[in-house]
Amino acid sequence: MTSHKIPFTKMNGCGNDFIVVDNRQGIMDGFDLPLFVKRVCARGTSLGADGFMMLEHSDLADFKMRYFNADGSEGEMCGNGARCLSRFAHLVGAAQEHMWFETLAGFYHAQIHPESQHVSVGFPDVILDDLKLNQAYPSDGPSTLYHYGWVGVPHTVWIVDQLAAISDRQIIDWGRLIRYDGIHFPQGTNVNFIEVRDRHNLQIRTYERGVEAETYACGSGSTAAAIIAGLLGLVEVESPVRVHTRGGILQISYQLSDGLAQEVKMEGNAKIVASGELLPDAWL
């Protein structure tokens, strides 16, 4: 693989950044993908990113999304990544403005808003009984209670005060403590810290599993937080919630019916910032 040049596009959704590759022709065949991804996502020594995505052929939808975290682990799904890959798929002619795509977490719908950088992604229904609210946690965590939900990937939500004033070091320390808590979360978890601004606005900071750091935004985490905050009565239910991430604003909407959160939709930007070729020194 040393002679390859790999065309890529660099994208980000609210600052959550990705290396995107069109793999419909199998240009990544033969690579040790976990090792390759870990190397090209390394900041400073390579291109650097929170994650790596491949657009692939699907027999069941417009395309397949394959997502890898920066540590080389393959993820089920990524909300900000989904918006970016949807815009990329439209750009390269793999999908129209309305599209369906396949992930390890199921099928998702997306809509391109061509007049802007924005993309909307529709999530599968969330089963409310699968959400675990008001769970007790030992006193060494950020709160004595947490809330848990699976929105494509596992998420915990922690309600805190003065979120913006919490140091980066503290977010990372709490994030690692919880993410690697094998008793409560044997498969690991993403860790979302939220503060309620008012009935329509949340502020959020996220420590992401697989990136093993705080990221500028987490789309699925923001979605989980908006649904959980609604069920807790902290924000208006069935009304769009503006989730303020460090990298921008995501708008989350959903409807409650028959024990489900339905028509779950996340809208936010998906920026195309660069394109070029990854050269062998990026992964060797």
Image (cartoon, rainbow, N blue to C red):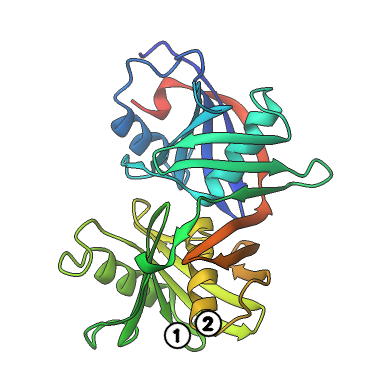
Residue drawn 67% across the image and 39% down it: 272
Rendered view: 53 above or below 158: above
Q: Considering depth in this image, is 10 or 206 the residue closer to the camera?
A: 206
Coordinates of residue 82 in the picture (x, y in percent):
55, 43
What crowding class fits label 2: few (fewer than 14 Cα within 10 Å), some (14-19), or many (20 or more)? many
Residue under circle 2? 195
Disc 1 target residue: 160
Query: Residue 72's image quarter?
Result: top left
Residue 49 picture location, percent across and down: 48, 44
Query: Up-down: is 184 above or below 115?
Result: below
Q: Secondary structure at mark 2?
A: strand
Amino acid type shown at disc 1 = Val
* Nearer to the camera, 180 or 107: 107
Residue 231 as seen in the image, left or right of residue 34: right
Amino acid carrying mark 2 in the image? Glu
Position of the N terminus, as image quadrant, is top left
- Where is residue 254 drawn, in percent x and y? 61, 63
Badge 1: few (under 14), some or many (20 or more) residues near its Cα, within 10 Å? some
Q: Is residue 136 left or right of residue 24?
A: left
Q: Residue at x 49, y 21 (%)?
A: 59
